[in-house]
Amino acid sequence: MSDTSSASQPLASRASGPLRGRIEVPGDKSISHRALILGLLAIGETRIENLLEGDDVLRTAAAVRALGGRADREAPGRWRVVGAGIGGLATPPDVLDFGNAGTGSRLMMGVAGSHPITTTFDGDASLRHRPMRRILDPLVRMGTVVVSEEPGGRVPLTLRGPDETIPIVYETPAPSAQIKSAVLLAGLNSPGLTTVVEREATRDHTERMMRHFGADVTVEAEGTGRRIALRGQPTLRGAPVIVPSDPSSAAFPIVAALLVPGSDVIVRNVMTNPLRTGLLATLDEMGAEIERLDSRDIGGETVADLRVRHSRLRGVVVPPERAPAMIDEYPILAVAAAFAEGETVMRGLGELRVKESDRLAAVAAGLAANGVVHRVEGDDLAVSGDGRAPRGGGLVATHLDHRIAMAFLVMGLASREPVRIDDAAMIQTSFPSFVPLMHELGAEIG
């Protein structure tokens, strides 16, 4: 099993001069995982540009190879995948070690669990604590056999797929694109119609990309949610994919530019899919000066260049129904809220408790360590500020969570005292160029 904690990398950030420049953050992690997975299930060749080459995505590429596909890196960000096709997967020769990759492991459970092969999944210490039962329950209904598992459906676990996968109608118990995607990926190898009903709409990259590869997918609105229907056993064909820049990664330099006085930064080619822009909507309400430039379409996704300038922020109430559109951005929003005038209340954050860490607890502890007034009430987080820089000066425990690490490094760029994190190693999972890109803008991190 991999262990990213064995060589921890403490890091600190301190008050910086104005951040200036134009940068492009790496490709979107969600789309990178899906491009590799659908390339595996397609017939022929898939060419991918701007693939995120963080550890999480590289684990998915390794799994593609282990399941009988090819995944070759031809140049930085440029990959060629040759698929095995639906129904053509091979039994992996060894355990699929996903490291810290929750998305990759959960989506690949839907793929492997719907094929007549036996597959064992494992990961690092963080992944071993993340619940998988919410993924396994619908897969079992579709015919997957859970051969072995750790208590609570945690990895390491072994799945054996059926000779024929059963199509189901499934209402997701929580707003989770990972649950939805695992069921839809399993449905690709099922005769008939597989349907997922969401009470709240979640990111729709799986549906979009399945259509791009030739699947028959329909989406109908149902109240605040959606009904997604997939006709199984299509012939997917390899297709080119250009991965836009990850809005969850772009969130860190965006908030840094808002907080550091005098900053003026352009972040290029950021995906602006409306199911991923909850943070931008919230920052707009807080008074952030963020300008969208040259909005355009790339490979079925809308992107724009974002010009961000230092802004005075004010507290707002973030409604719970916005959570699916910004679930990964709450740690950096909490940091922004610490600099705002007034109270920012973020409601409905229960899903944060089952991320790479208990993010709600980790964010609260990080705020406390840096002198920020806050409170946690159930699944709500309230952060209070007076419009000035918080004290800072704390040591933040990251709990192997890349977003906790980056969020509090951003805090240190504008707080009165430097902020330290206990380990930056796991930043490699999603944003390996984070520190050099921030240095390029003038950030004091080291």
Image (tube, grey):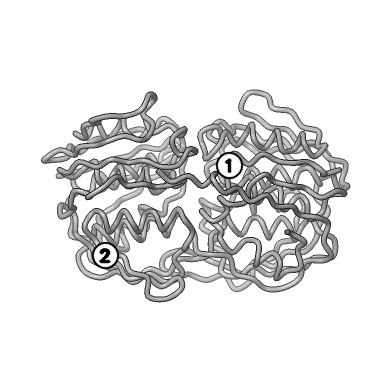
Name the secondary structure under disc 2.
Answer: strand
For the question of whether residue 134 can be seen, the reply is yes
Q: What residue is at 82 percent from the left and 54 percent from the top?
A: 414
Disc on res. 70: 2
Q: Nearer the viewer, residue 195 or 255?
A: 255
For the question of whether residue 229 can be seen, the reply is no
Q: Residue furthest left?
A: 163
Disc on res. 290: none
Q: Residue furthest front?
A: 6
Please state, as top left, top right, bottom left or bottom right, where the C terminus lies in the image.
Answer: bottom right
What x and y, as percent, mark residue 106?
A: 37, 42
Please state, as top left, top right, bottom left or bottom right, where the N terminus lies in the image.
Answer: top left
Q: Nearer the viewer, residue 250 or 200?
A: 250
Name the secondary structure under disc 1.
Answer: helix
How crowded pointer 1 is (Cα within 10 Å; few <14, some 14-19, many 20+) is rated as many
Q: Mark 1 or mark 2: which comes first in sequence?
A: 2
How far apart are the two marked residues, 1 and 2, measured between alpha carbons?
38 Å
**Left or right of residue 387: residue 113:** left
Q: What residue is at 26 percent from the left and 64 percent from the top?
A: 70
How crowded pointer 2 is (Cα within 10 Å; few <14, some 14-19, many 20+) is rated as many
What x and y, as percent, mark residue 281?
A: 65, 51
What x and y, as percent, mark residue 209?
A: 35, 59
* Residue type pointed to by label 1: Arg
Classify 418 as above or below 26. Answer: above
**Left or right of residue 51: residue 318:** right
What x and y, as percent, mark residue 336?
A: 74, 48
**Left or right of residue 313: residue 122:** left
Q: Nearer the viewer, residue 418 or 7?
A: 7
Q: Residue furthest bottom?
A: 75
Q: Which residue is mark 1?
A: 322
Check if mark 1's residue and mark 2's residue have beta carbons within 8 Å: no
* Residue type pointed to by label 2: Arg
